[in-house]
Amino acid sequence: MKAGWIGLGAMGGPMAGHLARHRHLAAVWNRSADKAKAFVAENEGTSAAESPAELAAAVDVICLCVSADNDLREVVDAIRDSLRPGQVVIDHSTVAPATARELAADLEKLDVAFIDAPVTGGVEGAKNGQLAIMAGGDREAVERVRPVMNSYARVMHHLGPSGAGQSAKAVNQLMVAGIAEAVCESLALMERLDLPREPMLELLGGGAAGNWFLDKRGKTMLADSFEVGFDPKLLLKDLKICRDLCDEADFTSAVLGQALDDYQRLIEGGDEGRDISALYRLKR
């Protein structure tokens, strides 16, 4: 099973690297050609396609990892005429469930399966091949490409029809935002009370308050280091998707409004391109 990869960003690059090491990856394409060439130089057996259409014509499975709904639509439009019956498109982007359903219905006309398969686990999870994948779409197609996704995932579950994966990611992002709010506020209070940093981090991490965000970002937050991680702009985009789903479901979230306001302030304050843990600066 030959796969191609489109989108070699902070998440997509490491994921494609694992796919190459498992000998599933044949070709890559990235908007920045230099990034694709650098990837190929480091991953034997892969080539850099001249265009998304060229990549799609040469492989059985097309994996996508882009930033937003319109980026995804542009890529799918670019590969559409090169697709053939029986191929599978796996989208690892985070977009609206409605977008996933729209694209799945369109590609179904070509007898091409579209799987919405957003991931969670952060850049660390991508680098370590330990991501969790939430998949929506045709179950048979998901099982057919499971070996591809197993190359970079710790766990993958099929959750339902098209859009289910993206709905699950919205739930995940709401929880991420809530945890970030709690951790950043708590550490800001810890500082205000002049409690010792290192013992407190060990105590908090070793008890009921322990969580991934505190473990991976606690020390860096206290050191005023926010350079590596998940861009606040992307989380804000995800939370807006979550807001729309909450409206559709007639569900009220106490966390969501605060998080939307906080990350908007963070971006307006110049923290775009840093990690979401820069929220600590607002809370402090």
Image (spheres, rainbow, N blue to C red):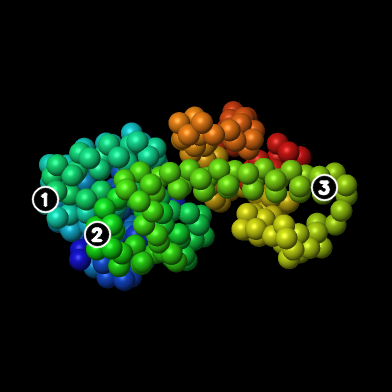
Identity of the residue drawn at 73% across and 38% down = 283
Neighbourhood count class around disc 3 (C-alpha, 10 Å): few under 14, some 14–19, many 20 upward: some
- Name the spot of residue 229 as percent of width and height, x first: 54, 50
Q: Which residue is mark 2?
A: 140
Identity of the residue drawn at 59% across and 43% down = 177
Front in this rendered view, residue 35 or 248? 248
Quarter of the rendering containing residue 4: bottom left
Q: Which residue is mark 3?
A: 191
Identity of the residue drawn at 51% across and 45% down = 171
Alpha-carbon distance for marks 1 and 2? 18 Å
Mark closer to the chain start, 1 or 2: 1
Neighbourhood count class around disc 2 (C-alpha, 10 Å): few under 14, some 14–19, many 20 upward: few
Alpha-carbon distance for marks 1 and 3? 59 Å
Query: Helix or strand or loop: what does disc 2 sit on?
Result: helix
- Name the spot of residue 226 as percent of width and height, x first: 62, 47
Q: How many marks?
A: 3
Query: Helix or strand or loop: what does disc 1 sit on?
Result: loop
Q: Amino acid at mark 2?
A: Glu
Find the residue positioned furthest to the bottom: 22
- Name the spot of residue 57 as percent of width and height, x first: 13, 52
Neighbourhood count class around disc 1 (C-alpha, 10 Å): few under 14, some 14–19, many 20 upward: some
Quarter of the rendering containing residue 189: top right
Query: Do labels 1 and 2 touch, CB within 8 Å?
Result: no
Task: Let me know if residue 34 appears in the view.
Answer: no
Q: Is residue 266 left or right of residue 207?
A: left
